Image: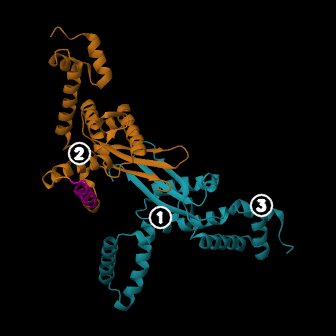
Chain colours: A orange, B cyan
Amino acid sequence: MSKVNLEDIQKLREITSMGMMDCKKALEEANGDIEKAIDLLRKKGAAVAAKRGGNSTSQGLVHSYIHPGGTVGVLVEINCETDFVARNEEFKKFAQDVCMHIAALKPVYLSPSEVDAAWLEKEKNFLNEQLIAEGKKPEFIEKILEGKIQKALSEVCLLQQKFVKNDKLTTEQVLQELIGKVGESIKIRRFARYEIGA
Amino acid sequence: MSKVNLEDIQKLREITSMGMMDCKKALEEANGDIEKAIDLLRKKGAAVAAKRGGNSTSQGLVHSYIHPGGTVGVLVEINCETDFVARNEEFKKFAQDVCMHIAALKPVYLSPSEVDAAWLEKEKNFLNEQLIAEGKKPEFIEKILEGKIQKALSEVCLLQQKFVKNDKLTTEQVLQELIGKVGESIKIRRFARYEIGA
């Protein structure tokens, strides 16, 4: 455990915004390897998220972003468990970042479960015909199709998209990190994105 | 025509925001009666609205309003024909007023044509049973029902609601006045209203 020094703990805190003790523990568990410690903290965030997932989220924030000139506008509602977290700066920053993300990356749905079945069917047929036209063997088509559908979903679903401010993580992973940090359940409930002429 | 004085013209301009010449003509036509002149200008606005109704509205503004504390938020898209009108102060003010209206009066639909058929059917059945329970004669029920349905629609549809800043007019009438003033077609295209816990 001698490998853990204060400098690394502080560095880890800056990267993950987790508490001092959490960072120290993660570094000890990772034998001083910062990359490994980040992974551990991320997993901890996801575990908290899973544990808190069932809790009622009746508080929160409605936040908006209007593009200069008023040609694009976004409205988002993000829920949490307590008013205390709704007023937390980190939570507000996340709401603002999600708005910017939606403005830039134009998600259509929140998650795959919301995707319009007719759209998905059309997309599947289109991709299937494309694969046949490319001469792919029938035994491979299903597998390739599955991957392509996942990719298409990750392009239209907010939670599956790579986050605008950190493209190493999806929006869902960034959300889970935030849940790990604040220690209560947080949900993006709904969003709207209006664009003039679109 | 001697009854028209500059003072009345200016008064009329303040009330309707229409041009000097329009106000003068309306006052002349109304023989100096300001109330009548307001009606004439209002009709003129509606006539312009009808004439411009078919024109393409591909420009506009997306505008938002967030209630202090972030518990209620509104996003609205208002379209017009030219970028010039979209940058007009009167147009911007209307967008802001519509946002405040939606925040306060909680419309669910834009217009009756958007109303969910299942909701309307349920509402009709409920009102019908109520009238029968009240002992209303069957020959009157249909007539009363029609009036009650219109009232219910005017409570949930943005365009039919009494405007928050002037409850003598509906949102649609205020919109028509604005069309009369700026002389091009304007449409409220869509809106969203999110409220925490609702």
Using residue B136 as the reference point, say whether residue B46 is left or right of it.
Answer: right
The answer as to whether the residues below labels 3 and 2 share one chain is: no
Q: Which residue occupies the foreground of this view, A64 or A89?
A: A64
Which label is found at residue A60? none
Question: Among all residues in the image, which is located at the extreme front?
Answer: A135
Pinpoint the chain carrying mark 3.
Answer: B
Looking at numbered disc 3 in the image, what kind of residue is underneath it? Gln
Q: Which residue is mark 2?
A: A56
The residue at the point 60 percent across, 67 percent down is B176
* Chain letter of disc 2 in the image: A
Residue occupying image coordinates x 48% and y 61%: B189
Residue span colored magenta: A122-135
Q: Are marks 3 and 2 in contact (CB under 8 Å)?
A: no
Q: Is residue B151 above or below residue A142?
A: below
C-alpha gap between disc 3 and disc 2: 58 Å
For residue A188, say whether it is visible.
no
Q: Residue furthest top?
A: A2
The label on residue B10 is: 3
Percent from the top left, x then y, of residue A72?
A: 48, 49
Q: Is residue B91 left or right of residue A17?
A: right
* Residue toward you, B51 or A92: B51
Q: Are marks 1 and 3 in contact (CB under 8 Å)?
A: no
The percent position of residue A99, horizontal first and vertical second, equals 40, 42
Mark 1 residue crowding within 10 angstroms, few (<14) / some (14–19) / many (20+): many
> What's the chain of the residue with tag 1?
B
Q: Which mark is residue B158?
A: 1
**Crowd band around label 3 with a 10 angstrom C-alpha radius: few (<14), some (14–19), many (20+):** some
Residue A30 lies, in percent from the top left, at 17, 19
